[in-house]
């Protein structure tokens, strides 16, 4: 009786080997080795917005929005004369460009554009009078016109500031008037622009300081670092 032969045992397949290696790594293999390497990067945890981070983002966004609104109102916005103002008794017209609002403690600028509408030249001066305000030192309210030609214009930039007032938060209006002279003789007194007074003292100074302050730069840098690491997943190299 013949004996049955036992089939040879199957050769076990090599099992994949998982390694956790630090970088940099130096691994050597035999020249005839057949190695398959699969690199798996660890999954980053999903971004979670906790209440502290949400509050910081909300406060920063709200503060930035308020600052931009104040910057637009007190720094950028300017009011232009809708039509030339005729200086009665003279051939002159005036256009005025001034800030939309001025505040106590701030310096302000107003451009006065004087045009000669006649066919003859004009020599004289126009004096700008500001109620509750005065010109800065080394500035003048008088605009001298030396033989201003026919249909020519002259622009004068007047720098002024408000006079001290007991109630800074009351607001108000700066009324301007234009006095025209020729040969030391007054030709006319004309009402000019009305400039609103802001309720916030030092508004322009404060806004410009916030724009250039180290605190603003630090907050912006902090928000950028948080966005870079937590939102965009960008890591420094």
Image (cartoon, rainbow, N blue to C red):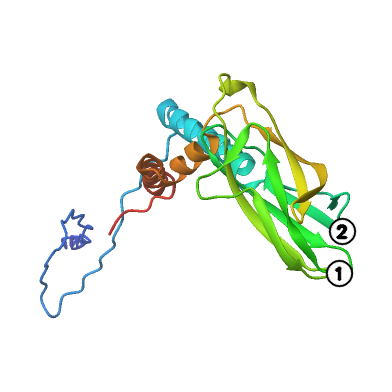
* 181 to the left or right of 120: left
Q: Is residue 101 visible?
A: yes
Q: Quadrant of the N terminus?
A: bottom left
**Dividing the image into 4 quarters, which one contains the C terminus?**
bottom left
- Is residue 183 shown left or right of residue 49? right
- Quarter of the rendering containing residue 204: top right
Residue 175, located in which quarter of the rendered image? top right
For residue 193, above or below residue 116: above
User: CB atoms at circles 1 and 2 under 8 Å apart?
Assistant: yes
Residue 78: tell me if it is visible: no
Residue 181 location in percent, x, y? 77, 52
Secondary structure under badge 1?
A: loop
Q: Where on the picture, by quarter, is residue 12?
A: bottom left
Between 209 and 196, the one lying in front of the other is 196
Seen from this angle, which residue lies furthest front? 184
From what the image shows, is residue 119 above or below residue 206?
A: below
Element under disc 2 = loop
Which label was assigned to residue 120?
A: 1
* Residue 100, horizontal then vertical, whole percent: 68, 41
Residue of label 2: 91
Q: Position of residue 44 (x, y in %)?
A: 35, 46
Nearest to N terminus: mark 1 or mark 2: 2
**In the image, what residue occupies the spot 61% across and 27% down?**
199
Q: Determine whether, in the image, residue 22 is placed left or right of residue 171.
A: left
| 36 is higher (above) or lower (below) than 223 | below
Mark 1 closeness class: few <14, some 14–19, many ≥20 residues within 10 Å: few
Mark 1 vs mark 2, CA separation in Å = 9 Å
């Amino acid at each position: 009786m013949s004996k049955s032969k036992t089939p040879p045992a199957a050769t076990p397949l090599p099992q994949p080997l998982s390694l956790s290696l630090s970088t940099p790594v130096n691994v050597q293999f035999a020249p005839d080795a057949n190695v398959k390497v699969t690199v798996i990067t660890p999954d980053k945890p999903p971004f979670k917005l906790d209440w502290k981070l949400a509050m910081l983002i909300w406060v920063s966004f709200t503060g930035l929005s308020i600052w931009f609104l104040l910057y637009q109102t007190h720094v950028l916005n300017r009011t232009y004369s809708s039509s030339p103002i005729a200086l009665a008794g003279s051939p002159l017209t005036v256009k005025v460009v001034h800030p939309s609002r001025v505040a106590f403690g701030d310096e302000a600028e107003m451009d006065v554009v004087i045009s000669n509408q006649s066919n003859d030249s004009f020599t004289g001066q126009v004096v700008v009078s500001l109620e509750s305000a005065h010109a800065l030192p080394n500035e003048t309210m008088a605009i001298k016109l030396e033989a201003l030609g026919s249909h020519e214009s002259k622009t004068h930039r007047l720098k002024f500031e408000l006079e001290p007032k007991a109630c800074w938060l009351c607001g108000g209006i700066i009324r301007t008037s234009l006095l025209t002279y020729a040969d030391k003789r007054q030709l006319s007194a004309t009402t000019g622009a009305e400039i609103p007074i802001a309720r916030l003292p030092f508004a322009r100074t404060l806004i410009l300081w916030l724009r250039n302050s180290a605190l603003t730069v630090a907050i912006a840098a902090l928000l950028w670092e948080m966005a870079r690491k937590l939102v965009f997943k960008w890591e420094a190299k």
